[in-house]
Image (cartoon, rainbow, N blue to C red):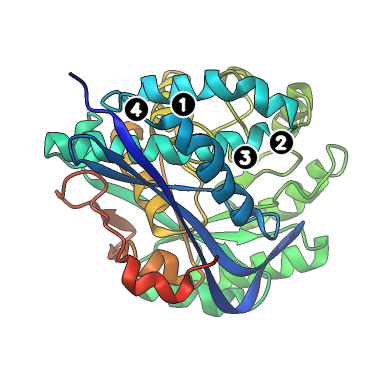
Amino acid sequence: MSPTITRLESHRFRAPIPTPLLNAFGAIASRPAVFVRLVASDGATGWGEMFANFPPGGDMHRATLVDTLFAPLCAGVACDEPTALRAMLEQRTRTMAIQCGEPGPFAQVIGAIDQAACDMAARRAGLPLWRWLGGTDPRVRVYASGIGPDGVGAIALARRDEGHRAFKLKVGFGAARDRVNLAELRDALGPDATIMVDANQAWTPEEAPARIAELAPFRPHWCEEPIRADHPIAAWQALAAASDVPLAAGENLRGSDAFRAAIDGGFLAFVQPDVGKSGGVTGAIDVGRYAATRGVALCPHWLAGGIGLAASMHALAAAGTSESWLEVDANPNPLREEVFPLAIRDGLATLSDEPGLGVEPDLARLARFASR
């Protein structure tokens, strides 16, 4: 008889930070996180994490969805097949998500539950998740993300001292400031450093070609989300045709159909599913393996706590290619650093052989950040 879910818990945290994190459309004034834990009838457990950065208070709303809707829905459900569990939850909540206009938050909760189910299944098997998923190498290439718009050279050099060899700059703060920041980063890191840029959907399809062309002389490895994720595929295709810089996107896509349409559209060189926004680990694996058949590299998006970072890294170790990268936030976040500390050496991070995600949050230690 298959083990069943006896409990789904939410654990909500918010860590203060000295300086808000800025991007082209807003700011993160503190670091939120919503962790979930599955407990099964055989005593097995598993952890997951959902997206909760925006809007302010979004972590409270998502935790409420877990406690009031998804916990009762999961009770008594078999949990030995994560893909089947995800499919059931998507099917059972689709109408309600449409009715209340919240497909995104519902998908985010399901993504976290999927991570927890994968963690649980790998723990039962006594295997690290990357190996349970079929991976053969625990090492992944990483890049330092979220740099900018202030002090970009100093931040990048500090991350380089910690082992990073690739870096991503936030742009979309005005053409002049973007050029100055990218020039500073290139001067600080040298001609051979890998530098990406992320516009966070800042530009219109009409202005994006010129903005990218202004940055192209500094040789960015990719330009991420130069236009809104919901612009028609034809707009993305036109931008890719007009740009000498490869395009990256995916953190704001939801569902396998949307990812396949984007990959088949031929405008992406790098696809960036977020395990806490859509599909969890199994969804990212599906995207990565399909992308590989089209010559598109899997590069998971993640800018939150340590559980989601661990899940992203395991998914990448299982389904990445030689062109793949893992996003690692360059900014302070104790909900990442105290949950899943990473040792980075010469641009690589290595997963352990611990069963599952290899992560067991110390709730007593994190209690000072508990948000209720």
Q: Do callouts 4 and 3 mark residues in contact (Cβ within 8 Å)?
A: no
Q: Earlier in the sequence, mark 1 or mark 2?
A: 2
Determine whether the residue tagged by mark 1 lies in a helix, strand or loop: helix
> Mark 4: which amino acid?
Gly
- Could you tell whether 135 is left or right of 149 in the image? left
Q: Mark 1 points at which residue?
A: 287
Q: In the image, residue 185 lies at what x, y percent?
A: 58, 69
Q: Name the residue under label 3.
A: 105
224 is higher (above) or lower (below) than 265 = below
Gap between marks 3 and 2, in whole Å?
Answer: 17 Å
In the picture, residue 258 is in which quadrant? top right
Q: Which of marks 4 and 3 is nearer the N terminus?
A: 4
Query: In percent of the image, x 70 and y 50: which residue is there?
Result: 200
> Mark 1: which amino acid?
Val
Q: Which of marks 3 and 2 is nearer the N terminus?
A: 3
Gap between marks 3 and 1, in whole Å?
Answer: 20 Å
> Mark 2: which amino acid?
Ala
Q: Mark 4 points at which residue?
A: 76
Q: Earlier in the sequence, mark 3 or mark 1?
A: 3
- Could you tell whether 57 is left or right of 306 in the image? right
Label 3 vs label 1, nearer the camera: 3
Gap between marks 1 and 2, in whole Å?
Answer: 17 Å
Q: Name the residue under label 2.
A: 229
Query: In percent of the image, x 51 and y 70: which residue is there?
Result: 331
